[in-house]
Each structure stands twice: as C-alpha cells, then as structure tokens.
Amino acid sequence: MARQTHRVGRQLRVAPLVAADQPAGALGVSPGNQPATVLDHSSRYISKATLVPVEVDQAAIDSSGSGQALVKLGYVRQLALQPGEVATVRNTLSALADASAQNRDFSATSPLWDLLTSFEGSPMPSLLPSAGDLATVSVPTLKTFGQALKALRQQRAGYLAANAVAARNSPMGPAAPIAAADPAAGALDLATARRLLNRSAVGNAGFEANTA
C-alpha cells in the first residue's frame, strides 16, 4: 500500500489509497513493474481554517455614553438607594450645573432625579422603571452620581463610627445626628451604613469595568 499527500488551495488532500496486489503477469508486465490500482472511494479532504481576532471600535459605536440600558439598570439597582439619598446627592451636584452637557443633567429640575428616586427603598420589581428609561442617561453622568453617592455614604459611615465611640466613652451619650445634611443618617445603624458603602464601592468598580 502507498499513500501520498498534496496541498490543494486551503484544503489538505490525502490521495486515494492504491493497491499493488495484482497477480504477477496479470497485465502482461513482469513482476515488480506491475501498475497500482487507484481506489477512488478512499479519497479524503481535510478542511483548514485560519482564526483571526475581530477588533471593534467601541468609540465609533457609542461615543455619547448612551445605550447600554441593561448595564445601567443593573448598576442603579446594585447601589440599593435609600430614601433621601438621591435628594442629598442632588443638593451637592446641582451646585455644579453649568452649560456643559453632563452638568445640565445635575440641574435641580433635571428629570434624572425623579428617575433615580424611583429606585429608592425596596420597590416592587414590577414598579421599577424599565431599562429603556436609563438608556438616554449618559455613562459619565451615572459615574459622577455614583461617586458622589459613595462619598456621601463614606462620610455617613465615618460619622456613625465616631458617634458609636462617643456613645461608649461619654456619659452624655452620642453626639447629635446629622439629619439636616443627610436625612437617611438617622435611620441607619453603623453596620448598615458600612454595607451600603461597600455596595457603592463594588457597584462603581463593576460599572467602570463594564463601560470601559
């Protein structure tokens, strides 16, 4: 038996097997010089492929930060917004509102605040805004809100930690709450405040990675 290989185009062809077992002299030739018989049914082809990476220009797809509705919805829900937090962040960021596109989203009359307020507390999932409602909110706007919320929660957790220490060490009891600046502070304990701060940190990091 003999086997040959040939490269044809982008396929590797294995030549058909041949048989060289004809009786000597059957074709009128001397032994050792008898022709081989081609077995056509034994032909095989092995397909070849070349894998190359596909590069997509994300900036060309979404340069404004709009879209990615499901990512934004997951991010806002992960923040676990508490009653009063959106209003506190609005008071901080609305002072930055100017003519720029992003800061206009933070004006006191921006629809962003009502949209985010609807996520506060523990609303029924069926009553939450749809992902499409967040599609037009730019990614930089949500990132700025998330950073401001994290700063608020960090300040709150620090205050409650210091207040807990003062309560243990002072016969006068804990210091006055900061409810005027942060309405949600008076309704939270230190453990909850730290848990919410962790949710902000993890949520911000995940949103940054998912929208990079």
Image (cartoon, rainbow, N blue to C red):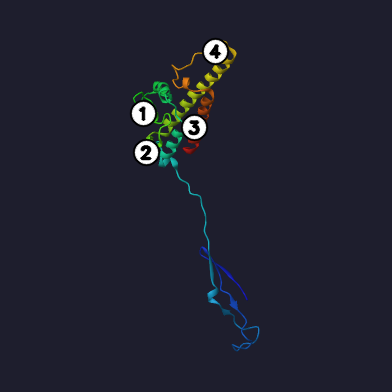
Residue 165 x/y as whole percent: 58, 17
Q: Earlier in the sequence, mark 4 or mark 3?
A: 4
Q: Earlier in the sequence, mark 2 or mark 3?
A: 2
Kindly identify which residue carries mark 4.
173
Which of the 4 image quarters holds residue 7? Answer: bottom right
Q: Amino acid at mark 3?
A: Asn
Kindly identify which residue carries mark 3.
204
Q: Residue at x 37, y 31 (%)?
A: 115
Q: Of helix, strand and loop, which one carries label 4?
A: loop
| Label drawn at residue 114 | 1
Residue 137 x/y as whole percent: 38, 33
- Outermost residue on the right side: it is 32
Task: Find the distance from the CA under tag 2 to the CA under tag 3.
Answer: 21 Å
Q: Residues within 10 Å of mark 4 (few under 14, many from 20)?
A: few
Residue 118 x/y as whole percent: 38, 30
Q: Amino acid at mark 1?
A: Asp
Task: Find the distance from the CA under tag 4 to the CA under tag 1.
Answer: 38 Å
Task: Find the distance from the CA under tag 1 to the CA under tag 3.
Answer: 21 Å
Q: Of helix, strand and loop, which one carries label 2?
A: helix
Q: Residue 63 or 88: which is nearer the viewer?
A: 88
* Badge nearest the viewer, 4 or 1: 4
Q: Earlier in the sequence, mark 1 or mark 2?
A: 1
Q: Amino acid at mark 4?
A: Gly
Q: Earlier in the sequence, mark 4 or mark 2?
A: 2
Asked whether residue 167 is in view, the answer is yes
Badges 2 and 3: C-beta atoms under 8 Å apart? no
Kindly identify which residue carries mark 2.
132
